Amino acid sequence: MLSVEGLRSRYGRIEVLHGIDIEIASGEIVCLLGANGAGKTTLLRCLSGVQPVAAGKITFRGENIVPLPAHRRLSRGLAQSPEGRQIFANLTVEENLRLGAWLYADDRVQRDMDDAFALFPVLKQKRALAAGGLSGGQQQMLAIARALMGRPTCLLLDEPSMGLAPIIVDQIFDVVRQMKALGLTVLLVEQNAFGALRIADRGYVLETGNVVLSGPAHELIESPRIREAYLGL
């Protein structure tokens, strides 16, 4: 579904991605691990179209999407739930969700919202409240639900567990599993390496803008390098 070849990106004169190659098959959960500053978020931003690509190719469902602006990538089925949630705090939960569906003006929007509420029942209870009044975990749920309103076939999830209590993290990861069961493809950026590898099919490890390790998730969990650097074992 998604293939990245020789991807390079820079901030000013400083190159931060040095020729990334990754592949994601339809229906997979693939996690992207690495320390702060490894280039994980930059890679997602390149994929979604909000960070310029200096060189390389991004092929999504058979099409090179590098020339496409971000909103065209969304219309092709590639959506991102960004790091830090970035919800619209002064708007209600329902208004945030409807903004996620801005591409569409059809009868499916209400069904999409009902589906989002089925994944995150607490959002239905708070649909008329300002999003800024939600807890951190509820705001993360809203950010994911808003991305799903764009009807993606591939969802880019950036640090969904950041700053959340363990019980909420488990809920978020359970929803990611449900997405896979519904046929959605997910690229998951996480610093919670163990939690991510538990639910992923495969994983890639980034260090200073390079892929240094990749493989099936169950093999990465057992890798001495991963266990020492990311699992604290």
Image (cartoon, rainbow, N blue to C red):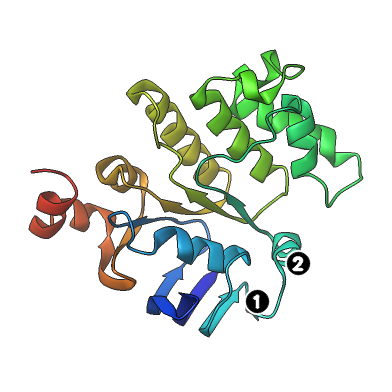
Look at the numbered disc 1 and give the secondary structure of its residue: loop
Q: Quadrant of the N terminus?
A: bottom right
In this picture, residue 142 sits left or right of residue 206: right
Q: Nearer the viewer, residue 126 or 223?
A: 126
Residue visible at 74% across and 43% down in the picture = 100
Is the residue 8 above or below the residue 38 in the image?
Answer: below
Percent x, y of residue 153:
63, 56
Q: On the rendered structure, is 101 left or right of 136?
A: right
- The residue type indicated by label 1 comes to Ile
- Rendering quarter of residue 126: top right
84 w.r.t. 151: above or below: above
Image position of 64 (left or right of 84): right
Which residue is rendered at x = 65% and y = 76% of the image? 65
Q: Secondary structure at mark 2?
A: helix
Name the residue at the right extreme. 106
| Residue 92 percent coordinates (x, y) | 75, 24
Disc 1 and disc 2: Cα gap in Å? 9 Å
Disc 1 to disc 2: CB gap under 8 Å: yes
Image disc number at residue 72: 2
User: Type of residue at label 2?
Assistant: Arg
Question: Residue reaching furthest top?
Answer: 125
Judge whether 1 appears above or below 159 on screen: below
What residue is pinned by disc 1?
Answer: 65
Q: Residue at x 83, y 47 (%)?
A: 102
Counting other residues with Cα less than 10 Å from the Cα at mark 2, is it few (<14), some (14-19), or many (20 or more)?
Answer: some
